[in-house]
Image (cartoon, grey):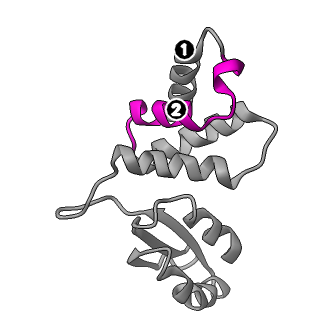
Amino acid sequence: MTHQSIEQLKLYPPETKFTVKAKNFETGEIKIIKNQTAETYPKLLSYLKYLNANGYNIFLSPSVAGEGETKATASNCMAYIEKVYNSVSSDDISGLDFKAALYGIRKGFTQDEIKTAILKFSPNIQNRKKGHIDDYLLRTVKNASLK
C-alpha cells in the first residue's frame, strides 16, 4: 500500500490535492481526509496503516477543483503525461500511450490536451505511426475514455 500509493502520487503535478477515503466494508463506516498533497501524504501513512489493519480499505483519488481552486490546465497535462512516460520503462510503447491517455482522462484533461501531450512525449511516434498519427491518437484517447 505505502510504496504503490506514493508512486501513484508522483504521476500527478506537485500542486495536485488528493482525497483519501477509508471504508470498512464490514461495518460500512467511511472516513474521508481531504486536501492531501504529495508533501502531506507521507505524514498520514501511519494512520492509514492503522485503519488498514483494522479492516478499512484505503482509496486515493485526486480532488475535483472547487471554487477558488485551479482546475487542470494544458500545461499541467503536459507535465503529467511527461511523468507517465518518464516513470515507466516498457517495450510496449502503444500500451504506454494508452496508459498515458487513461491517466490523462482520469485527471480530467481534454482529449485535445491528451493527444498533444502524447504526440510530444511518446517515443518515436512519428516513425511508429507514420501516415496515421491523428487516427492513432484519436483511437487511443477514445478507447481510454471507455475504460
SS category of the residue bearing label 1: helix
Q: Residue 135, which numbered label?
A: 1
Q: Which amino acid is tagged 2?
A: Leu
Residue extending furthest left?
68
Q: Residue 106: x and y, percent?
A: 47, 47
Q: Residue at x 51, y 21 (%)?
A: 138
Range covered by the magenta-colored residues: 109-129
Judge depth for marks 1 and 2 and give the one in front. Answer: 1
State the quadrant of the N terminus: bottom right
Q: Residue at x 58, y 17 (%)?
A: 133
Decide whether residue 79 is among the magenta residues: no
Task: Mark yes or no: residue 147 visible.
Answer: no
Depth order, front residue of 83/34: 83
Residue of label 2 = 146
Relative horizontal placement of residue 51, taking residue 117 as reference (left or right): right
Packing grade of label 1 (10 A; few <14, some 14-19, many >=20) is few
Query: Above or below — where is 24 with respect to 59?
Result: below
Depth order, front residue of 131/95: 131
Decide whether residue 128 is among the magenta residues: yes
SS category of the residue bearing label 2: loop
Packing grade of label 2 (10 A; few <14, some 14-19, many >=20) is few
